Image (cartoon, rainbow, N blue to C red):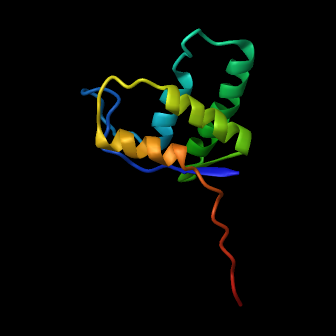
Amino acid sequence: MKVLNATQTDLKETDAAEGTMTYLDLAKICLNAPPERGFTPDEMRARMRVLDALDAAQGQDAGCLILEDADAVKLQSCVQAMRWPRMHRQLVEFLDAAANMAAPQVKVKTA
């Protein structure tokens, strides 16, 4: 299992957009971006599985996205392959966060 936090950024989808985006919003952009040669059925299924987990996390205001290892690898490959229309420090921070997703922290309660 790997975790991507829903870190808030100053980035907007467009200059006219009202709200700012989180790392989960940026992940969704990467997953929806077509591969160089288009989507194969297997690629669509793999990305949809990650998008379903992402939608569930955003719907619950979970604050993070928790993925199985194979789904985390799929997200990481989509993020790495993405070509961005602009340069921004927070995009680089998102790229680093996605590349370095780690196992969820388990909190142990002590008596």
Q: Report x, y in % for residue 96.
A: 46, 46
37 left or right of 10? Answer: right
Q: Tell me what residue is drawn at x 45 percent, y 41 percent.
A: 95
Q: Report x, y in % for residue 93.
A: 39, 46
Q: Single out the residue that lies furthest toward the bottom.
A: 111
Q: Quadrant of residue 18?
A: top left
Q: Tell me what residue is drawn at x 44 percent, y 50 percent.
A: 7
Q: Quadrant of residue 43?
A: top right
- Whether residue 42 is situated above or below residue 17 in the rendered picture: above
Q: Single out the residue that lies furthest toward the left.
A: 15
Q: Report x, y in % for residue 87.
A: 29, 32
41 left or right of 19? Answer: right
- Whether residue 15 is situated above or below residue 5 in the rendered picture: above
Q: Tell me what residue is drawn at x 60 percent, y 45 percent.
A: 57
Q: Tell me what residue is drawn at x 73 percent, y 39 percent.
A: 70
Q: Quadrant of residue 106?
A: bottom right
| Closest to the observer, 14 or 103 | 103
User: Disc count in the image?
Assistant: 0
Q: Report x, y in % for residue 94.
A: 43, 43
25 left or right of 107? Answer: left
Q: Quadrant of the C terminus?
A: bottom right
